[in-house]
Image (tube, rainbow, N blue to C red):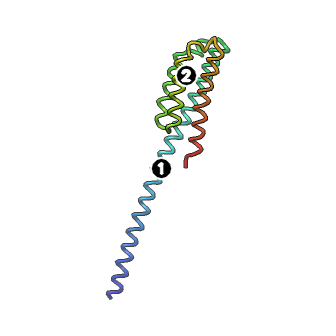
Amino acid sequence: MYKKLRLYQATVIFSVLFALIGFSYNVWRMEASEENNNIRTACFEILINLSSLEQLVYSAHYDKDLEEGNPRKGWVTVGLVVDLSALTDDAVREESATLKKVWSNQWSAMASNRDSVEKIVASIDSVRAEIKTLLNSLE
């Protein structure tokens, strides 16, 4: 009888430990998945905004269309990219901050100066490259 009781107690303890370990893993996995999902969503939104910014730069420079290439729209887009980068990693945040700095130095000349366009587009491409690296590194 004592042996059966010990076996029952050992089984109960093992079952409780197994349930706790399983629950803990499940919670950890769900949190990791949610964080990765938030990062992916932010990255995709940043990519969409980067393409809008690039289109704006090209409209201003090549088409001389100051309605589509309005720098105020560019400021809003750059600001949104910087804001969304807070949900990503350090490398994307740094490249986004660099994009904002390049934009602030080059936006006024983008309509007439090809060098300004190239600097802005190169900075956009740098943010894109960091986003691709981040997305490839997610679990």
Of helix, strand and loop, which one carries label 1? helix
Q: Viewed as shown, does residue 27 lie left or right of 108? A: left
Q: Viewed as shown, does residue 13 lie left or right of 121? A: left
Q: Which numbered circle lies on residue 62?
A: none
**What's the residue type where badge 1 is placed?**
Ala
Q: Mark 2 points at which residue?
A: 102
Q: Name the residue under label 1.
A: 32
Outermost right residue? 62
* Few, some or many residues within 10 Å of mark 2 (<14, 14–19, 20+): some
**What's the residue type where badge 2 is placed?**
Val
Q: Quadrant of residue 117?
A: top right
Residue 115: x and y in percent read 64, 17
Q: Are marks 1 and 2 in contact (CB under 8 Å)?
A: no
Vertical comparison of 26 with 123: above or below: below
Q: Which numbered disc, 1 or 2, marks the residue that appears first in the sequence?
A: 1
Q: Viewed as shown, does residue 17 lie left or right of 55? A: left
